[in-house]
Amino acid sequence: MPAIVFINRQSQGKRVLRKILLIGYVLILAAIIFLADRKGTRYVLGFVGNIPYGDKLGHFCLMGGFAFFANLVLDARTFRLWKIDNLLLGSAIVVVLVTLEEISQIFVSGRTFDPGDLFFDYLGIFLFGELARWLCRKKKT
């Protein structure tokens, strides 16, 4: 019996840590978006312009990381949409939020809507989401 209690406490600790990591990650993303809306990222992220395709790589990694943590927190929970099974809930939530944020740039002075950014956002969300799914499945076996 004590071994079961220990395992439950350990898994609860992991869940709490995952939630803390997700919240921290979202706060960092919010800060980056806030700075970008006010043209303040050049001081913090100016080096990205020196990396070939740095902006696209940034979108891929940042939004992919968001999907990764969201799916870990949700334990890679899936849902069905029309006839498509096993869609990751965390990835779907991130797709909606990221799409809304990218579209909102149309209305922000100094920002531009870029379908290329959205493509790399989606690519990162898909690949990092699948990585989270794989880790959650591996944990269960």
Image (spheres, grey):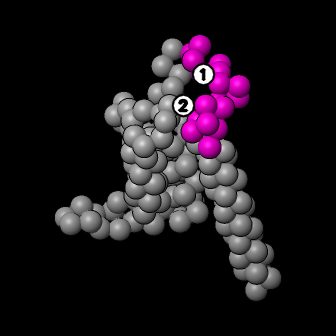
In three-dimensional space, the C-alpha distance between marks 1 and 2, rounded to whole angstroms, equals 8 Å
Q: State the residue at coordinates (39%, 45%).
A: 103
User: What is the residue that sits farthest to the front in this orientation?
Assistant: 109
The image shows residue 55 at horizontal and vertical percentages of 51, 26
User: What is the residue that sits farthest to the left in this orientation?
Assistant: 83
Is residue 71 in the magenta section? no
Mark sitting earlier along the chain (1/2): 1
The image shows residue 50 at horizontal and vertical percentages of 59, 13
- Give the camera-side residue of 29 and 133: 29
Name the residue beneath numbered marker 2: 58
Q: State the residue at coordinates (50%, 31%).
A: 110
Q: State the residue at coordinates (42%, 32%).
A: 112
The image shows residue 113 at horizontal and vertical percentages of 39, 35
Name the residue beneath numbered marker 1: 48
The image shows residue 127 at horizontal and vertical percentages of 43, 42
Where residue 1 sits, quadrant-wise, is bottom right
Q: Tell me if residue 3 comes above or below residue 68 in the rendering.
A: below
- Give the camera-side residue of 110 and 43: 110
The type of residue carrying mark 2 is Gly
Q: Which residues are magenta?
A: 34-51
